[in-house]
Image: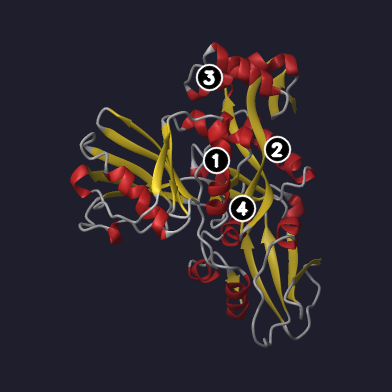
Amino acid sequence: MEIRNARAEEWELFLALGQYAFQYELSEADQEDWKRRFESLHVWGAFEGESLQAMLIVIPLHMYLQGQSVEMGGVASVATWPEQRRNGAVKRLIQQALQHMRSEGQAWSMLAPFSYGFYRKYGWEMLTEHRTYTLAKTQLPQPQDVGGRVERRPVLNGALAKELSPLYEAYASRYNGTLQRTLEWWETSVFKRKSGQAAIYYNEANEPRGYVVYACKNRNLHVHELVALDEQARRGIWRFLSNHDSMINHLYWSAPMDDRLPAQLPDPRIGQSIEPYFMVRIVDVMGALSDYPFETVSGASSVRCIRLTIEDATCAWNQGVFELTPEAAGSVRVSRASADETDGLNGVSLACDIQTLSVMMSGYLRPFELYRMLRLQGDEEAVRMLEQLIPARPTGMLDFF
């Protein structure tokens, strides 16, 4: 079996496997778009001779982490022909993809799993969930006059992407895990998956402060994306949505987990469901920790440094002991240490696997939560310091790949 990059002339082999595995059919126009973009994607295949057995794509992306943009490898289109399953091809593709991401400086990776258990074996862990609301039209928020205005945009295109992009980026940077979107990503991914139209809220100073991308069909209103930079924008957008009450029976919206819509309704007993969504993995521990925007620790501490032992069964380069040393200027120095190296009197030790480290540093679970779950083991004083060093910020994801 040979693991290698796809050649330009092999695009139809990969397209055929993708359509079969994920049960979709592309139009001729979409097939031409796939062919055009094929060379720019990092497409990997497992081959026996000229026969493609399995495939995997690594999409070079950027995600927000503690308000900063970091490089991330998005793993997508992992597929195998059924007669070739369980022959080790996908395992080898994943190992190759992780090595590739590390060489490209992508210290983080994300994916949407078909099976959480499958990808946990290779080091990915939960990043975020969706809270999906179902509102009958009688449960919609009562329209409030908050000033400003809403302008509809019936065509989802490049011009609209330029309008929505600054609003999205300001909103997305409030979460960990959200994508930093290029204008090309808006057109080739966002608008292709979220069909319908958009509306932009402008405040009384004529400043755009929020938007909604939605589709209204068969007496149902599906909110694909709702972005509000302040409370006035949120109320203005909901006023616009509630004014559809004569046209619809229900409204559906997959909101971020920190949304509090029910608390702002006259009757909070609306339909709600929670569904796990994306997974995250640290590809390169040294790179991820060295560039991490740690919080400044206030006050004196008796702890000189944290010695963190990491287990990673897939990426040997992550195995070992990492020292986190808070410095006087407020930064954190990250270094490697040998497992048998003594740390002096003021060092405290912790140990965890790569899944636990990934979920902790991404912000989905806090250090003390993981400590109580016995996933983070060691000195409680070190856990207390990590609680101070890692800023609390919700995770979120509005995209799919």
Asked if the residue at tag 2 contacts the one at tag 4, i.e. Cβ–Cβ closer than 8 Å, the answer is: no
Compared with 250, 269 (above or below) is below
Mark 1 vs mark 2, foreground winner is: 1
Q: Residue 377: image x %, image y %?
A: 58, 70
Query: Which amino acid, mark 4?
Result: Tyr
Which type of secondary structure does the marked residue at label 4 adopt? strand
Scheme of image coloration: secondary structure
Which quadrant: the C terminus? top right
Which type of secondary structure does the marked residue at label 1 adopt? helix
**Cα distance in 3D space between marks 1 and 2:** 35 Å
**Cα distance in 3D space between marks 3 and 1:** 33 Å
The mark nearer the N terminus, 3 or 1, is 3
Which mark, by number, is residue 163? 1
Position of 117 with respect to 341 (left or right) is left
From the viewer's side, name the closer residue of 80 and 367: 367
Density class for disc 1 (Cα within 10 Å; few <14, some 14-19, many ≥20) is few
Q: Name the residue carrying label 2.
A: 97
Which mark, by number, is residue 19? 3
Mark 3 vs mark 4, foreground winner is: 4
Which mark, by number, is residue 64? 4
Instruction: Name the residue at 27% across, 34% down.
Output: 220
Query: Which amino acid, mark 2?
Result: Ala
Which type of secondary structure does the marked residue at label 2 adopt? helix
Mark 3 vs mark 2, foreground winner is: 3
Asked if the residue at tag 4 contacts the one at tag 3, i.e. Cβ–Cβ closer than 8 Å, the answer is: no
Residue 81 visible in this rendered orientation of the protein? no
From the viewer's side, name the closer residue of 142 and 71: 142
Mark 4 vs mark 1, foreground winner is: 1
Instruction: Name the residue at 29% across, 60% down.
Output: 264
The mark nearer the N terminus, 3 or 2, is 3
